[in-house]
Image (tube, helix red, strand yellow):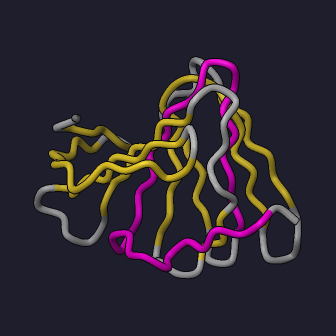
Amino acid sequence: MLSEFSFCGQLWKIVNNESYEVDSGVHCDNYQIIGDSEQDLAMIKVSPNARTPRQLVKYGEKTIEVFLEGSGKLFVENERGEVVEHHFSKGQNGNFVLISIGDKMQWIAGENGLLFAEICKPPYREGRFINIDNE
């Protein structure tokens, strides 16, 4: 388990709240940021060639997807149906995408798997993301 996380020049002390299997090949460790109750952090590990569930962002002030290691793609579809495909690989650690309310998103891991962080402000609560079937 991690005890620190660095993002955009800030070093956060963190403590694990819970760990769970999101879906087959997708594992999440959820962290509280010490001294900052307005946001939280999740570290999501995706097995090689696995994918996260496709999710609709229902609410939240800020949702940030941060690529950390491995390789993969993040698909983001806005409310107008426009899809942007973000490709990530070695050397792009720390690159991130800001997700808006109403966006649909899904990560797909490459051959070596991937690790990404998700920062939620306010902290994640059930119902923030709704799993949706691929259309």
Q: Which residues are magenta?
A: 104-133
Q: Residue at x 33, y 70 (%)?
A: 123
- Whether residue 23 sits left or right of residue 85 in the image: it is left
Q: Position of residue 29 (x, y in %)?
A: 33, 46
Q: Residue at x 55, y 36 (%)?
A: 46
Q: Is residue 123 located in the magenta-colored stretch of the structure? A: yes
* Residue at the farthest front position: 24
Query: Where's the C terminus, which quadrant?
Result: bottom right
Report the number of discs. Answer: 0
12 with respect to 61 (left or right): left
Location of residue 88 with respect to 116 vertically, above or below: above
Residue nearest the viewer, comparing 98 with 43: 43
Nearer to the camera, 2 or 25: 25
Estimate the x, y position of residue 23 in percent, counting from the top left. 55, 50
- State which quadrant residue 101 falls in: bottom right
Q: Residue at x 13, y 56 (%)?
A: 34
The magenta stretch spans residue 1:
no
| Quadrant of res 134 | bottom right
